Amino acid sequence: MLGIKEIEEIIPHRHPFLLIDYIEDYKPGEYAVGYKCVTFREDFFRGHFPQEPVMPGVLTIEAALAPVGAGAILSQEGFKGKTAFFGGINKCRFKGKVVPGDKLKLETKIIKQKGPMGIGQAIASVDGKVVAKAELTFMVG
């Protein structure tokens, strides 16, 4: 398991844009499984939406799933100390809401990699129910 300090040694994301609490399991270059414990104190809930707080879908993808995938990529020996950038988001679907009190499970599996470029299959779920999924294209720079 990787806590925040270990995650920060692998990926460059920092608060307030590091929206993962820990990585439960990972294999460099293959996959990573992390979690975000969603609390009412998240800054984005003040405006999205005050009457019915919902975690923005773009943050579920960009600030939660992507860093988990970056952990899998950047933990490889040749990529340590580098940054993984987005090259694209494909086949993105939102299937449910993420609200305060949810424990968001974040899974990214690297399905294709050629040199510094690749694609990760990313799935976010709450209590076993998929709330978002996408294919994330990355470039290591």
Image (spheres, grey):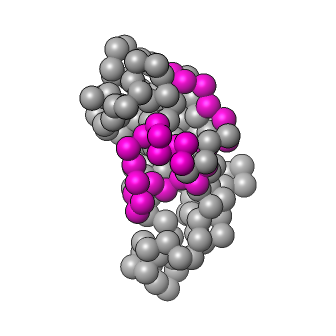
Residue 91 lies, in percent from the top left, at: 42, 38
Q: Is residue 4 above or below residue 73?
A: below
Direction from residue 88 to residue 67 in the image, left or right = right
Residue 135 lies, in percent from the top left, at: 44, 34
Residue 40 lies, in percent from the top left, at: 57, 76
Q: Residue at x 48, y 22 (%)?
A: 76
On the rendered image, what quadrant is the C terminus found in? Answer: top left
| Figure label count | 0
Front-most of residues 109 and 129: 109
Q: Residue at x 67, y 40 (%)?
A: 1
Q: Residue furthest bottom?
A: 51
Q: Residue at x 43, y 80 (%)?
A: 46
The quadrant where residue 70 appears: top left
Start-end of magenta stretch: 5-29
Q: Is residue 121 visible?
A: no
Direction from residue 41 to residue 15 in the image, left or right = left
Q: Is residue 96 above or below residue 124?
A: below
Q: Residue furthest right?
A: 127
Front-most of residues 108 and 115: 115
Q: Residue at x 72, y 55 (%)?
A: 127
In the rendered image, residue 45 lying in the magenta stretch gets the answer no
In the rendered image, residue 23 lying in the magenta stretch gets the answer yes
Direction from residue 11 to residue 106 in the image, left or right = right
